[in-house]
């Protein structure tokens, strides 16, 4: 994590993917959910504070998708017995989607954060804000 803190997720991921892909047809990705901070992924085998954030994890998967050299993917260390309301499993599915090219949206990122805190009012406020921004962007695009 220190490398990521000091150099940034993009730099570290690009370097790792270059090394993994050098002289190969591609690479296998093993997504260990223990890597993610337990605030976002509570249902893991060995939760450790200070892991990747929700957004950092998605960025890493999006960078993998951008490279287009992933040959296989596995997700490990999801423990449904200790997961809270299926949050870790849901995040794993989102991250798999990102690894295959789906981009997260503003709404997904903030709704996840606020919903995990149990604040329905903020989730609704963010939904309205996201809808307003989408409308404004659409109107500007038409002009």
Image (cartoon, rainbow, N blue to C red):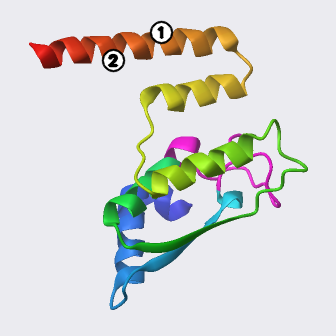
Q: Is residue 52 above or below residue 121?
A: below
- The answer to whether marks 1 and 2 mark residues whose Cβ atoms lie closer than 8 Å is no
Q: Is residue 8 visible?
A: no
Taking depth in this image into account, of 5 and 106 the one nearest to the observer is 106
Measuring from the top left, give residue 33's x and y in whole percent.
Answer: 68, 58
Taking depth in this image into account, of 6 and 126 the one nearest to the observer is 126
Which tag, 1 or 2, sits closer to the chain's start?
1
Distance CA(mark 1)–CA(mark 2): 10 Å
Quadrant location of the C terminus in the rendered image? top left
Q: Main secondary structure of the magenta part?
A: loop
Give the residue at mark 1: 128
Taking depth in this image into account, of 141 and 84 the one nearest to the observer is 141
Measuring from the top left, give residue 21's x and y in whole percent.
Answer: 37, 81
Q: Relative to 93, is 80 on the left or the right?
A: right
Query: How many residues crowd mark 1 within 10 Å: few (<14), some (14–19), many (20+)?
Result: few
Q: Residue at 34% across / 15% down in the picture?
A: 133
Q: Is residue 126 shown in magenta? A: no
- Residue extending furthest toward the right: 81
Label 2 residue SS: helix
Give the residue at mark 2: 134
Q: Is residue 51 shown in magenta? A: yes
Q: Residue at 33% across / 59% down in the picture?
A: 66
């Amino acid at each position: 994590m220190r490398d990521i803190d000091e150099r940034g997720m993009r730099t570290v991921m690009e370097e790792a993917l270059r090394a993994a892909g050098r002289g190969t047809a591609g690479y296998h990705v093993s997504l260990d959910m223990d890597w993610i901070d337990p605030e976002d992924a509570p249902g893991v085998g060995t939760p450790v504070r200070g892991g990747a954030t929700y957004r950092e994890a998605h960025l890493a998967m999006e960078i993998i998708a951008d490279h287009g050299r992933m040959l296989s993917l596995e997700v490990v260390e999801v423990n449904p017995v200790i997961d809270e309301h299926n949050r870790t499993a849901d995040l794993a599915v989102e991250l798999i989607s990102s690894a295959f090219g789906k981009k997260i949206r503003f709404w997904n990122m903030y709704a996840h954060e606020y919903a995990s805190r149990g604040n329905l009012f903020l989730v609704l406020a963010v939904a309205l804000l996201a809808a307003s921004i989408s409308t404004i962007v659409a109107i500007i695009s038409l002009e």
